[in-house]
Image: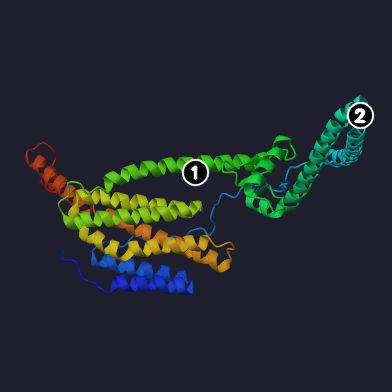
């Protein structure tokens, strides 16, 4: 069937998206996208997918927030000691070190002056004892000062942490006016000496977790991320085969495959940057549908005109919506407008996914009709040969009896 030309559709769709982004009114966009999809399917003689645009989505996104999952009624309490090592020894060493440094230091100076004026064996002995004791006392004094400073830093750390079960290292560094590298070493010492009784640093040394439950959640998140990375690597290998144009002579098909590959990569990059699990599932579904469509298209290049319309109209639209979602999701404070906009974008992605499902299904409509026709012909031939009962003879045979 000749494809109808609708040159203004792509511009109208792009205009809808721009208006929605500018006004932050994505509810109307979902309705407009639904209407445009129905219009395109009518042009292509494809039955619009049932429930297009009606499938809602939850407005909540599941994120990995360390330490936020608690049983009902359970209060998350940061686990650190009230008095860390050095609370007593720091001031004590400072005091004693200061006193004895003064005593032995003065004694060393006096004896050195006397020895220089009246050299004697006794004076030499006193100096050999006083000077080392003065140095040892100075070391004790310096160590006491360091311990006292460390205790003060610990107080600042715990004041910032409060009742939280995790805290970013950069926040701790800002609180004490030290570099992040210094604070990581400092925190590790407090973990080693059990000042943070259940403390853990993440693998990148960017976050301090203060209870085992939070740390387990972190490890589970890391493992999920590792599995997700492995799956993504496997998917990319599969995509290289699906989106390979080697051996294809049709330049239009080659162009479509290259465009589809660029589109999939862009969606995947945005998906990797969005932590929400629900939106990611929708985008994984979209990736899988697009990949399957191109896999089938290489076997059925005659279906390319159908796909071209969707590539022209909805691939740029979908990518723009995903990138807008990524920008909204990155905002430090998610107000009601942002949450509502994200929910409407998710709903629109459901609509687009349904459309891609129907498009893929339409690729097999001709094959299904051919198979049905072949089965009918085969049944008729077998019946004519007397190998099966002819269904058309059932009624007439009954009349003859």
Q: Is residue 217 left or right of residue 368?
A: right
Residue at 32 percent of width and 43 percent of height: 238
Q: Nearer the viewer, residue 210 or 340?
A: 210
How busy is the neighbourhood of tag 2: few (under 14 within 10 Å), some, or many (20 plus)? some
How far apart marks 1 and 2 lie (CA) works out to 72 Å
How busy is the neighbourhood of tag 1: few (under 14 within 10 Å), some, or many (20 plus)? few
Position of residue 341 relative to residue 222, above or below, is below
Q: Nearer the viewer, residue 338 or 163?
A: 163
Q: Residue 207: horizontal and vertical position, in percent?
A: 62, 46
The residue wearing badge 1 is 225
**Dot 1: what SS?**
helix
Q: Residue 319: horizontal and vertical position, in percent?
A: 38, 61
Q: Residue 250: horizontal and vertical position, in percent?
A: 16, 54
Position of residue 251 relative to residue 150, above or below, is below
Q: Is residue 132 left or right of residue 236?
A: right
**Dot 2: what SS?**
helix
Whether residue 169 is visible to the viewer of this picture, yes or no, is yes
Residue at 82 percent of width and 35 percent of height: 135
Q: Nearer the viewer, residue 378 or 192?
A: 192
Q: Going from the N terminus, do you reach mark 1 or mark 2 first?
A: 2
Q: Residue 351: horizontal and vertical position, in percent?
A: 39, 61
Contact flag, marks 1 and 2 (Cβ < 8 Å): no
Question: How many labels were placed on the picture?
Answer: 2
The residue wearing badge 2 is 123
User: Among all residues in the image, which is located at the extreme left?
Assistant: 385
Whether residue 84 is visible to the viewer of this picture, yes or no, is no
């Amino acid at each position: 069937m000749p494809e109808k030309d609708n040159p203004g559709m792509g511009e109208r769709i792009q205009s809808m998206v721009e208006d929605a982004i500018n006004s932050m009114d994505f509810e109307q966009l979902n309705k407009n996208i639904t209407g445009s999809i129905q219009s395109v399917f009518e042009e292509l003689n494809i039955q619009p997918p049932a429930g297009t645009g009606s499938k809602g989505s939850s407005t909540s996104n599941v994120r990995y927030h360390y330490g936020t999952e608690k049983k009902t009624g359970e209060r998350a309490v940061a686990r650190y000691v009230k008095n860390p090592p050095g609370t007593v020894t720091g001031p004590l060493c400072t005091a004693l070190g200061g006193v004895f440094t003064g005593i032995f230091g003065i004694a060393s100076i006096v004896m050195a002056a006397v020895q220089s004026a009246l050299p004697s064996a006794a004076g030499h002995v006193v100096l050999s004892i006083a000077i080392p004791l003065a140095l040892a006392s100075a070391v004790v004094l310096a160590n006491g000062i360091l311990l006292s400073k460390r205790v003060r830093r610990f107080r600042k750390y715990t004041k910032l942490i409060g009742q939280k079960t995790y805290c970013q290292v950069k926040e701790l560094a800002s609180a004490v006016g030290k570099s992040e590298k210094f604070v990581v070493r400092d925190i590790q010492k407090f973990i080693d000496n059990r000042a943070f009784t259940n403390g853990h640093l993440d693998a990148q040394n960017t976050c301090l977790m203060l209870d085992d439950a939070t740390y387990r959640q972190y490890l589970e998140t890391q493992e999920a991320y590792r599995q997700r990375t492995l799956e993504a690597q496997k998917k990319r290998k599969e995509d290289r085969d699906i989106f390979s144009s080697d051996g294809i002579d049709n330049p239009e098909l080659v162009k479509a495959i290259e465009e589809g590959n660029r589109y999939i990569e862009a969606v995947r990059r945005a998906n990797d940057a969005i932590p929400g699990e629900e939106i990611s599932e929708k985008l994984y579904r979209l990736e899988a549908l697009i990949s399957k469509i191109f896999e089938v298209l290489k076997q059925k290049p005659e279906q390319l005109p159908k796909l071209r319309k969707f590539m022209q109209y909805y691939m740029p639209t979908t990518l723009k919506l995903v990138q807008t979602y990524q920008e909204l999701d990155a905002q430090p404070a998610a107000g009601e407008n942002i949450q509502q906009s994200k929910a409407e974008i998710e709903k629109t992605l459901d609509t687009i996914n349904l459309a891609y499902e129907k498009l893929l299904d339409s690729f097999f409509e001709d094959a299904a009709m051919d198979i049905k026709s072949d089965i009918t012909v085969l049944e008729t031939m077998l019946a004519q040969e007397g190998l099966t009962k002819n269904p058309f003879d059932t009624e007439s045979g009954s009349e003859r009896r």
